[in-house]
């Protein structure tokens, strides 16, 4: 079963807008974690908003758990959209009262356990919360209604490394259940590298690649050479390059590289930077 | 929606606290001054700011975005806002009801229930009418700004206010017969006509339908083409709703709904006062005639317990029963002649010597210790303080059934001013006291404001033996 499936989704905010999400198709099998990466303005948030129905899409279809999108499927999706999800006047106890009527499987006990674990005060108004605390609260809510899918839009942005690490651990725990899946968008690639089974890369509204992380790292590598040497390689195999006075650094498909080239393993972050900056 | 409504209230918690504090203040002030109008307006402003803040916050905040990813519909979210607005409005109205009730608690203890009910109804209806006008204006401003700015989502906030306005009109129409409402404009009176109510109902339905479609637009997952069709239909409905509303307003205008009501004490009003006085006289005479029978029967005899009981029964039959406390009867037993039997031969009242004293003594038993005509006169005079606008003064006069006996125009150093004479304030209350007191109020009004207020009090002792 797929946690979600997006088919040919397109979205353009207005005719004058240069940005356009173009025919994106994406599938996440159940039990997997997918990292959605891309530079600022690549379309990550637009994609998530459109798939959740927060904004209307121009075309395409979305299904969750092999069912067409509907209100009931939202009951099984935990969402973290940033720090300002809840009205500032409320406190975590009031958030509990509100959410337990919204989600049919709301687990009050789990929610308060998570608040304790995250060291969040129960009676303090959210306006007095730090950014990290607000994100933790959103995560606590997302994890407290027995969701099968978490959709997280840049949950770790702006947080210090300690909190980020803590949050990544929480997602690990969530995915111990093989039925649970996560879609997480971020441009902090190091977090995703630790966490994800799949990496989807969006660039200027287009899905450039979507692969299993391990296959991706097997498939691609980095070579360091001169510009002349690079010309010997099939241009289709070169996914990105960065030219400097000391030579050229390029992301290449391993299968098409002649044996004389020394191929270094590539990290997701290097791959991401070179794909964005050196896209051919 | 219930839980979203909880959010609306929780979000406005601090505002609600201020609201409750202000409400208490209104109640206290109304008790002291018998006036709620100024703070009443403050409460209205508070209610509106609460609603506007609440709605505005959602428009700007991440909640609006986040809530659309939750398993609830836009219609539920909007419904919560709508219900919240209505509840706040009703809460304010309820506070005003209570304020009116408590403001007149002294009159209630004096048994003036009719007066209290009248004031209560008038205030409540005027209050609802006032709120509907404020909501209506707010709605209109929202609608116009939304249409000009092309903000569909903002329109979603604005449109439901229109039915709220219509519902308040219907409520005020239901609350009391329109002919009894004294408001500045005649709208409420005109709105009671069936055709207006039907038109308003149609507008409300159209507005609600448009709101629902706007919610559908926001929730829709379909492609842009389908969305266009829904948008067009919503626009048609909104235009239709506006057209019907416009037609209603035109019909109201045609029927004189927006003409300013002139404050004048009509013959009808004066007749109703006269009828009340005659009714009181009739009741009083009946009691006197009946009293005469048992006064004559016991004349000159010492009162026994049995006779006290008899008198008690007779008094009860004559409508005085609820005014006799056990203590008074005991007192009368100890001093048998004090209940009204001893005054035969009163030279001051040759025609009805015994009767008058019985009446006076019976009245004396139900005097409420902390109320007397002087206090009441001073309280009423205290409302007409220097600087109060003439319009407000007339409003108060109407609230307390004070009909000016004469209005004179004079000059002071060449400057014109008016003097309102009212000289029967306490007369209606005579049966409640053992004194006859008449109070005359003279209020000078210059440049639309009270300049001076003079109070003349005359006490006429009906029964010197008991005073």
Image (cartoon, grey):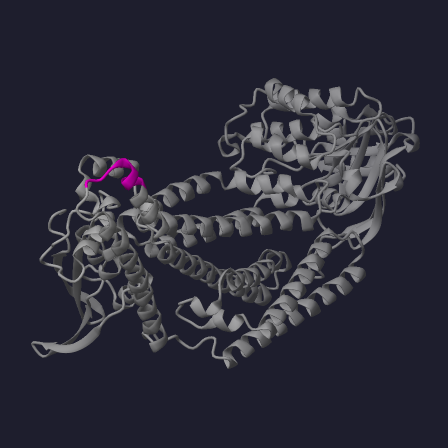
Does residue B210 sit above or below A51 in this rendering?
below
Picture coordinates of residue B348, whole percent (x, y)? 10, 58
Q: Is residue B165 visible?
A: yes
| Magenta stretch, main secondary structure class | helix
Q: Residue at x 54, y 24 (%)?
A: A122
How many numbered tags mark residues here?
A: 0
Residue B308 falls inside the magenta stretch: yes
Q: Is residue A154 visible?
A: no
Picture coordinates of residue B218, whole percent (x, y)? 70, 53
Q: Which residues are magenta?
A: B302-309
Residue A261 falls inside the magenta stretch: no
* Quadrant of the image containing the N terminus of chain B: top right
| Front in this rendered view, residue A2 or A124 | A124
Picture coordinates of residue A39, whole percent (x, y)? 69, 40
Does residue A26 sit above or below A172 in this rendering?
below
Q: Quadrant of residue B167?
A: bottom right
| Front in this rendered view, residue B241 or B342 | B342
């Amino acid at each position: 079963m797929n946690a979600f499936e997006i088919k040919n989704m397109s979205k353009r905010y207005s005719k004058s807008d240069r940005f356009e999400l173009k025919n994106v198709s994406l599938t996440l099998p159940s039990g997997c974690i997918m990292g959605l990466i891309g530079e600022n303005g690549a379309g990550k948030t637009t994609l998530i908003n459109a798939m959740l129905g927060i904004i209307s899409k121009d075309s395409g279809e979305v299904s969750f758990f092999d069912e067409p999108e509907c209100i009931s499927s939202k009951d099984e999706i935990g969402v973290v959209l940033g720090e300002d999800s809840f009205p500032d006047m409320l406190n975590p106890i009031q958030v509990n009262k509100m959410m337990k009527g919204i989600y049919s499987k709301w687990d009050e006990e789990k929610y308060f356990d998570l608040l304790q674990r995250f060291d969040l005060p129960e009676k303090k108004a959210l306006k007095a919360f730090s950014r990290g605390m607000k994100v933790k609260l959103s995560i606590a809510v997302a994890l407290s209604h027995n969701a099968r899918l978490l959709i997280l839009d840049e949950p770790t942005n702006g947080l210090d490394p300690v909190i980020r690490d803590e949050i990544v651990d929480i997602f690990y725990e969530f995915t111990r259940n093989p039925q649970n899946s996560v879609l997480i968008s971020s441009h902090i690639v190091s977090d995703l590298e630790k966490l994800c089974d799949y990496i989807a890369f969006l660039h200027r509204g287009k899905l450039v690649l979507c692969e299993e992380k391990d296959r991706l790292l097997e498939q691609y590598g980095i070579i360091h050479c001169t510009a002349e040497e690079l010309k010997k390689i099939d241009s289709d195999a070169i996914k990105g390059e960065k030219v400097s006075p000391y030579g050229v650094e390029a992301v290449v498909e391993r299968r098409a590289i002649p044996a004389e080239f020394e191929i270094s393993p590539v990290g997701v972050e290097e791959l991401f930077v070179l794909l964005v900056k050196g896209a051919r | 929606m219930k839980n979203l409504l909880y959010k609306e209230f929780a979000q406005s918690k601090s505002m609600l606290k201020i609201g409750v504090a202000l409400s208490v203040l209104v109640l206290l002030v109304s008790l002291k001054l018998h006036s709620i109008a100024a703070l009443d307006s403050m409460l209205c402003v508070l209610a509106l700011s609460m609603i506007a803040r609440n709605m505005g916050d959602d428009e700007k905040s991440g909640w609006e975005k986040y809530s659309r990813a939750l398993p609830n519909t836009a219609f539920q979210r909007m419904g919560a806002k709508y219900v919240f607005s209505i509840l706040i409005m009703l809460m304010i109205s309820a506070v005003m009801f209570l304020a009116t009730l408590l403001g007149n608690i002294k009159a209630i203890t004096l048994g003036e229930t009719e007066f209290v009910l009248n004031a209560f109804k008038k205030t409540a209806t005027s209050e609802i009418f006032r709120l509907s006008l404020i909501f209506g204006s707010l709605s209109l401003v929202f609608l116009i700004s939304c249409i000009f700015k092309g903000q569909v989502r903002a329109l979603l906030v604005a449109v439901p206010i229109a039915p709220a306005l219509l519902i308040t009109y219907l409520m005020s129409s239901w609350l009391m017969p329109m002919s009894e409402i004294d408001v500045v404009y005649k709208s409420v009176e005109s709105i009671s006509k069936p055709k207006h109510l039907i038109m308003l109902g149609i507008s409300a339905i159209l507005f609600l339908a448009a709101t629902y479609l706007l919610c559908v637009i926001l929730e829709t997952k379909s492609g842009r083409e389908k969305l266009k069709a829904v948008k067009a239909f919503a626009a048609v409905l909104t235009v239709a709703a506006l057209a019907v509303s416009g037609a209603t307003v035109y019909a109201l205008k045609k029927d004189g709904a927006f003409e300013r009501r002139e404050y004048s004490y009509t013959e009808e009003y004066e007749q109703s006062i006269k009828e009340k006085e005659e009714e009181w006289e009739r009741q009083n005479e009946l009691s006197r005639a009946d009293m005469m029978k048992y006064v004559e029967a016991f004349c000159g005899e010492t009162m026994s317990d049995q006779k006290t009981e008899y008198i008690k029964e007779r008094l009860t039959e004559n409508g005085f029963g609820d005014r006799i406390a056990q203590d008074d009867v005991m007192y009368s037993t100890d001093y048998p002649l004090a209940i009204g039997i001893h005054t035969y031969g009163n030279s001051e009242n040759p025609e009805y010597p015994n009767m008058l004293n019985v009446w006076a003594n019976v009245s004396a038993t139900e005097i409420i210790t902390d109320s007397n005509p002087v206090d009441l006169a001073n309280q009423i005079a205290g409302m007409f303080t220097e600087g109060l606008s003439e319009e407000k003064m007339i409003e108060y006069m109407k609230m307390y059934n004070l009909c000016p006996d004469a209005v004179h125009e004079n000059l002071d150093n060449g400057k014109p001013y008016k003097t309102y004479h009212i000289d029967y304030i306490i007369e209606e209350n005579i049966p409640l006291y053992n004194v006859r007191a008449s109070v005359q109020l003279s209020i000078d009004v210059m440049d639309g404001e009270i300049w001076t207020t003079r109070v003349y009090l005359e006490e006429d002792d009906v029964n010197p033996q008991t005073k």
